[in-house]
Amino acid sequence: MSLAFTKMQGLGNDFVVLDGITCALDMTPERVRRMADRRYGIGCDQVLLAEPAHAPEADFRYRIWNADGAEVEHCGNGVRCMARFLRDQGLSASDRMTLETMNGLTHVELMTDDRVRVDMGPPVLTPSDIPFLATTQRPLYSLSVGHQQLEVAAVSMGNPHLVLRVDDADTAPVARLGPRLEGHPDFPNRVNAGFLQVLGRDHARLRVYERGVGETLACGTGACAAVVAGVLNDWFDARVTVDLPGGRLVIHWAGTGEPVWMTGPAVPVFEGIMAAGAE
Ligand SMILES: N[C@@H](CCC[C@H](N)C(=O)O)C(=O)O
């Protein structure tokens, strides 16, 4: 059976977006890997699927798979693209939606340009809930990686992140350390690893080695986690412009108990049909 899809991107973090509302779709890890493959498939960092909501407060359910085929909890750039997809496809007539992810509700507002503003909810900092193997919660933890001791922050935005402050994002050892951090045994569910350069109290640069993908051009939950880490460590004020290789996000976090706000673009690229047999 052939399969209609929309290719979208948020700051170059790219997605195959599927409508599982008008037609139920059965996703398997193998199917996701085929779609995500940049030579044999469509190519993307994540596959996103819209489904009918389970929770009465939600308008839609939104599911996410990394390119390696694993289903994950959240995707910041993806949630903006999903909201735009739902409106562009006529599945929602509203500029405001509540989307249900694997472990919570996300409130989204489509703005008058390509941008989308998202209430990402409060960050999770309790180590066991990230999950991260530390006994007490701290703004920075010492992590052994080979012969190195790294000072990292650990934050969940629904999905697990660590944040390592670096002097220069351009020369940060993302390719060398990224895979070792992603699979670090102190993060039992693996982790997304952010390399954060602080430019000032309201400005940062960030590169992210994403769990299940590798380095991407941008990571929305990674930018939220980096700003949370920076506020907790008094590197940042509440509102921070985060420059990622693929472009800019504005993140706002007023502190403990408050939600993290993320504003950035969501852009459709093309629509297509995956041929029968290929999907
Ligand atoms: N690109 C995303 C994050 C996608 C999921 C992540 N790789 C994970 O495994 O948690 C974003 O924009 O947040």
Image (cartoon, helix red, strand yellow):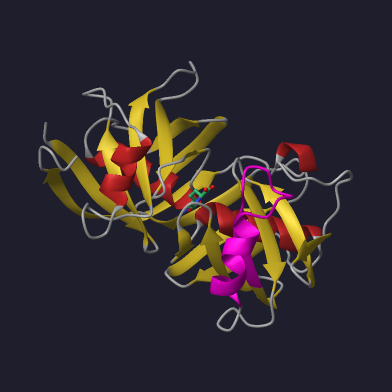
Q: Going by the image, does 37 lie left or right of 163?
A: left
Magenta residue check for 184: yes
Magenta residue check for 71: no
Residue in view at x 73 percent, y 59 percent: 229
Residue 124 found in image quarter? top right
Nearer to the camera, 251 or 224 = 224
Residue in view at x 33 percent, y 42 percent: 32
Q: Residue furthest front?
A: 146
Viewport quadrant of the N terminus: top left
Residue 273 percent location from the top left of the image:
12, 43
- Picture mark count: 0
Residue 110 seen in this snapshot: no
Residue in view at x 60 percent, y 77 percent: 173
Q: Is residue 124 above or below residue 25?
A: below
Residue 36 percent location from the top left of the image:
31, 51
Q: Going by the image, does 35 lie left or right of 61?
A: left
Q: Residue furthest right?
A: 136
Residue 103 percent location from the top left of the image:
57, 30
Residue 200 found in image quarter? bottom right
Q: Is residue 105 above or below residue 88?
A: above
Residue 57 percent location from the top left of the image:
50, 20
Residue 115 seen in this snapshot: yes
Nearer to the camera, 184 or 78 = 184
Q: Which residues are magenta?
A: 173-196
